[in-house]
Image: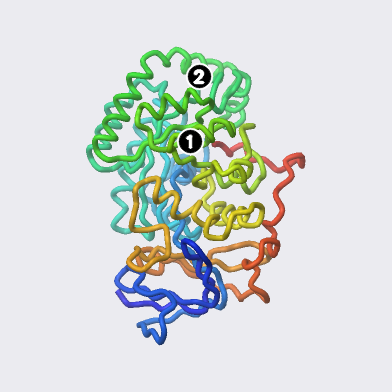
Amino acid sequence: MPSTYLTHARVVMPDRVLENSAVLIDDGRIVAIDPDGAQADREIDLQGQTLMPGLIDLHCDAIEKEAEPRSRVLFPLDFAVAQVDRRNAAAGITTPYHALSFANNEWGVRNNKTAAEVVRAVRAFRQHSLVDNRVHCRYEVTDETSVDMLRALMDEGAVDLLSVMDHSPGQGQFKTLESYLQYMMGNHAMSREQAEAAANAKTRAKDGAVTRVETLLSHAQSLGIPTASHDDDSIQRIATMRNLGVAMSEFPITLDTARAAVSCGLPTILGAPNVLRGQSQSGSMRAIDAIRAGVASCLCSDYQPSTLIAAAFAVAAQTDLTWPQAVALVTANPANACGMTDRGRIAVGQRADLVAVAQVGGMPLISHTWSAGRLVFSTHYLPARAPAAATRDAHAFSKPVDPRVTLPHSPLERV
């Protein structure tokens, strides 16, 4: 693989920012930082753009919309995987964890047979991928049918992260029965009668959930697969999940829950769309409040890959976090949470997963993405007149969205 010398960059290191610096990459690795007189097969002048580690996204279900862009309209799965791979490269996400739900026959692509086919399609496409595509299997605890299927997928080496979730009404994301019904009717075009039937089925299926969860988590842990809990809504839930050996908490509902997770060593994962919009679409806590309180470990793109880089820049503008700390929310911290020691930071010897970020119309946009030293995305942006990323108030992301303002809301949004 040809060596590449990236020059005139604002380099975000783990503990500081190097202005007008350079990085040398060779054979898929970072081999030098700010070297004197370096030579390489190719030199790219980044003209003051910000150079960061490639983004690591532990939870994004955008692949579901690539596979099923409209209700009951399924595209060929190899086509869908190829498209989401390109989408992640353009978003600067070099290690995406594609989140697939196993919830029996809930709706569309969210049924076990299709979900398993998507998992295997991601695995089959890896040899052609632009980025390091991984799989995050989400087990719905009220699903009585998918335990053996998930065990088989784990045994095949097709699962990189396993989470357990409970979307039954009356807890977690759906604090009331009515909130569950409204979600199912709005997001999935169910009639009220259909939504009520789904709610009743979930409630009935909670019997035996604890045993199923214990079985799956134990199997994942025996194979060294990281595990997470989803929508934790109480200190007691955190304690239960921690006792089951879960390694991280996704989308904790309240600040107290997030504090409990962090206090017992569980990294927390919150949504980048929540940061960008200034509020949770389900009425849970604001991610920016958790970040300011020091109880947010990682950000994920949730359902929209393009939000991850925007959220990192918004955090740097809206909080007291340093640039390295804000960037770590989408790079080093997710890597640490999943035990990946070869990526997530700019350091000699690390995998050369890198992104260059330009300021365009006040927005941070990806101009280049390198995955293991290979340039997988590139576009041309004229350099900003001033290094906008160098100050906290120099871009449009310096002001949080006012949650009191009525915003356009897509019925396709979901946590």
Horizontal and vertical percent for residue 367? 53, 68
Indicate left or right for 8 with 353 as reference. Answer: right
The residue shown at (42%, 21%) is 142
Horizontal and vertical percent for residue 363? 64, 62
Q: Is residue 169 above or below residue 41?
A: above
Q: Secondary structure at mark 2?
A: helix
Work out which residue is located at the far bottom of the displayed protein and give it.
37
Q: Secondary structure at mark 1?
A: helix
First reached walking from the N terminus: tag 1 or tag 2: 2
Q: Is residue 237 above or below residue 267?
A: above
The residue shown at (37%, 26%) is 243
Work out which residue is located at the far right of the displayed protein and give it.
405
- Residue at mark 1 to residue at mark 2: CA–CA distance: 36 Å
Disc sitting over residue 79 in the figure: none
Total labels: the figure holds 2
Disc sitting over residue 263 in the figure: 1
Q: Residues within 10 Å of mark 2 (few under 14, many from 20)?
A: some
The residue shown at (62%, 66%) is 389
The image quadrant that residue 316 belongs to is bottom right
Residue type highlighted by circle 1 = Ser
Q: Quadrant of the N terminus?
A: bottom left
Disc sitting over residue 198 in the figure: 2
The image quadrant that residue 23 belongs to is bottom left
The residue shown at (40%, 45%) is 337
Residue type highlighted by circle 2 = Ala
Q: Nearer the viewer, residue 292 or 338?
A: 292
Q: Residues within 10 Å of mark 1 (few under 14, many from 20)?
A: few
